[in-house]
Amino acid sequence: MRVGAQIDVAAPPELVWAFVTDPTRTLHFMAGVTRWEVASDRDRGLGARYRTLMRVGSAEVGGLVETVEYEEPCDLAWTSVTGLDQRGRWRLRPSGPNRTRVELRLSYGVAGAGIPGWVAEQVAAPTVRGNLRRSLLELRRQVEHEQARRRAAARRAAAQRPA
Amino acid sequence: MPATRAATHNGRLADALTDTTNDAAGSTGIAQRLVQAVAGQVRNRVPTADLDERDPDFIREALPGLWLLASLYFRGEVRGLGNIPEDGPVLLVGNHSGGNVTPDTGVFILAFSTYFGVERRFHQLAHNLVLSMPGLGFLRRFGTVAASPENAERALRSGAALLVYPGGDYEVHRPSWERNRVDFAGRRGFVRLALEHDVPIVPVVSIGGQETALFLSRGEGLSRLFGLDRLFRLKVLPISLSLPWGLNVGDMLGHLPLPAKITIEVLPAIHLRDQFGGDPDVDEVYDHVTRTMQETLDALASERRLPVLG
């Protein structure tokens, strides 16, 4: 099953990238995600691994995932090592001056689960899709807040600078 | 059971029945012979515990179906899985509900397997009768083994998480009006097991399972009358009102559970020697575990507004 969501953020791709690649921030904006722990020596970049869980229905599902694509500041993809079969992607593209189109995709399923597996994927889809949408809304709120904070800091610094 | 023990037991039963009428004694004798024949079959069918029968691939492929059942039918909710130590052997001690169909066990197996992954060894102890029942062989692939001290030791020694229900058949068939009561019937074996292997105890408290039918009586007298306690290690011959049977005596074929909301709370791990000293008193630990579980069950019960609906 493949679900996705996208949103426009009033900030440059570099700033959005800083948020989506920082594992310490993930739990703060990813809706439904109950665990996103670094499980490798490196905390980001190609080969970085994370233990992930998302609450869907009666269970927290996920597993160990590994970053398989890391192209600054536009593409980050991960795939599952253990647990639920999944492949996810952050796709960031400039959509205007100082604006970024952010897309979050997730494909998931359990190979070999047959008809119950197919039904479970369909039943879970609205919850997962809702989680992705809420995650993007929260990401936008946090990124734009950070953008505003940085601009204010720059203005204060300029005002304090001797003429 | 050795033949001499069975004969002695039958003799006692016969003595107890001498004051009944000949007809009644005759029919009871037939019933006993029938029970003994079934007991022989059951003994032959109880599989020897082979921990290797647990099949992670099978579990993984079964999880979506279990998830559908748990999420849509029982609206299962499991809290506090983070309280279970991340690795190493651990003794999960649960209260048992739902008669011979125990939805809380299914919901917990799903939650544990998705949270820690099917790669983590996880075994459950079940009554001999459950494992010998035709059609339930798949439970062994989930990691279920017959309840015995040897199997429990073997599982813990292998580094597995082990789920036990000390209350067993006694607790699982308690009347519906005792649904919010933890009742291990004084069985303290789990404490000794945890001490012997020096593993933490993690209490697992569930609510809702005893609302899946109307449980009327454990039928302990009936069980004694037919010698089920000796032959099958069955202390009870439960009587309930359940689907699709209506009046259900024995619950041997199971029943269709009502879609009661199942809520499970996993409590913080109890490290016995850290908490109770180098040589903990078994009774003290037992009282602590059951009291803690009862307090949690009371709290879960106070959250429930309506039976079944939750």
Image (spheres, coloured by chain):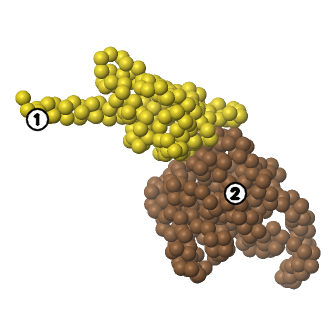
- Label annotation for residue B123: 2
Residue B54, given in percent of the width and then of the height, sits at: 75, 51
Question: The residue under label 2 is which amino acid type?
Answer: His
Q: Nearer the viewer, residue B19 or B241?
A: B241
* C-alpha separation, residue under disc 2 versus residue under disc 1: 67 Å
Residue B23 at least partly seen: no
Of residues B32 and B115, the one nearer the viewer is B115
The chain coloured yellow is A
| Circle 1 residue | A160
Kindly identify the residue that appears in the image at 54 percent across and 40 percent down: A49
Q: Nearer the viewer, residue A126 or B112?
A: B112
Tell me the crowding category of disc 1: few under 14, some 14 to 19, or many 20 or more residues within 10 angstroms, Cα based. few
Q: Callout 1, which amino acid?
A: Gln
C-beta proximity under 8 Å, tags 2 and 1: no
User: Element type at marker 1?
Assistant: helix
Residue drawn at x 55%, y 36% as measured from the top left: A47
Per the rendering, the mark at residue B32 is none
Q: Which residue is farthest left?
A: A163
* Residue at x 57% of width, y 42% of height: A64
